Image (cartoon, rainbow, N blue to C red):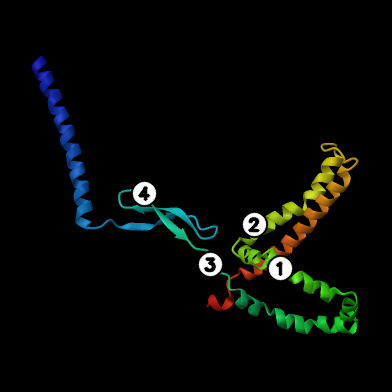
Amino acid sequence: NLHLCISAKYTQHMATALCIAAAVTAFSGASSASGVVQRRAPLAAVSMGGNKKVYSFEGVDGGLLEAREVSITKPPVYLLTRLNEMKVATGLAESGLLSAAEEAGVFSKLESAGAFSTAEKLLPLVEKFKLLSLFEELLEVEAGLLFTAANFLIVFTPVVLTLQICGFVPFPQGPVIPVEALACLSTGAAGFALFATAFIIGNLQEEPASFQQ
C-alpha cells in the first residue's frame, strides 16, 4: 500500500511538470513563429511641458509592458505669423488712436514733459535686465501657469487684508506699515503686469490658422 501511494504521488507530480513544460513550449513557439513582437498603440504618455524626457509605456503581445524613454517637444511659437494673423497693426490704424492722441496734443505734452528723453535713457535697461530674453523664455511657458502665478500675486493683498480683519493676522504697526504697503503694491502691480503678459503670450502660443489647414 505504501509503495502504491508513493507511485501515485510521483505520477501526479510528473503529470503536473509535463503540463507546465507543454505550456511554456507552446508560448515560446507562438512568439518565435511571428518572428518579431507586435507592438500596440501607446497606453500612456505624458505630453505636457516643454522639451523634456519622459517614459512611455507600450503594450506588447502577451500582456507585457515595455517602458522606453521618449522626447516630448513643445510646438514652436510663430511670433511674427501670429502678430500678422491678429492684425495688430491694422487694428491700431483703424482705431485712430495715434491720430486722436496727436489732436489732443498728447505727444506735445509728453515732449514738453521730457517723456521721450526719459524713455531714451531707459532703453539700455532693456538690454541690461535682458527683458527681451525674458519675454522669449516666457513664450515657452504654458500660458495657464502664467495666469495661475498672476492670480496668486493679485489676490495676495485682498487675502492679507481679509486675514487681518478676521483677526488671524495682526495689523502692522510702526515701521512695518510702509513695508507692508510697499509689498502689497508691488505684488499687485506685478500680478496685473504678469496677467497682461500671460494674455498676450496665450494668444501668441496658439497655432497659426495657416498651419491648421
Residue 185 picture quarter: bottom right
| Residue at mark 3 | 75
| Residue at mark 1 | 126
> What secondary structure is marked by label 1?
helix
Residue 77 picture quarter: bottom right
| Residue at mark 4 | 65
N-terminal of the pair, mark 1 or mark 2, is: 1
- Answer left or right for 176 relative to 65: right
Query: Of residues 185 and 58, which is closer to you in this image?
Result: 185
How many neighbours does mark 1 have within 10 angstroms: few (below 14), some (14-19), or many (20 or more)? few
Looking at the image, is mark 4 or mark 2 nearer the viewer? Answer: 2
Question: Amino acid under label 1?
Answer: Val
Query: Of residues 108 and 91, which is closer to you in this image?
Result: 108
N-terminal of the pair, mark 4 or mark 3, is: 4
Question: Amino acid under label 4?
Answer: Leu
N-terminal of the pair, mark 2 or mark 3, is: 3
* Inter-mark Cα distance, 2 to 3: 17 Å
| Residue at mark 2 | 145
Question: Amino acid under label 2?
Answer: Leu
* Inter-mark Cα distance, 1 to 2: 24 Å
- Answer left or right for 7 relative to 127: left
The residue shown at (68%, 68%) is 127
N-terminal of the pair, mark 4 or mark 1, is: 4
* Inter-mark Cα distance, 4 to 1: 52 Å
Estimate the x, y position of residue 53 in percent, counting from the top left: 46, 55
How many neighbours does mark 4 have within 10 angstroms: few (below 14), some (14-19), or many (20 or more)? some
How many neighbours does mark 3 have within 10 angstroms: few (below 14), some (14-19), or many (20 or more)? few
The residue shown at (88%, 45%) is 177
How many neighbours does mark 2 have within 10 angstroms: few (below 14), some (14-19), or many (20 or more)? few
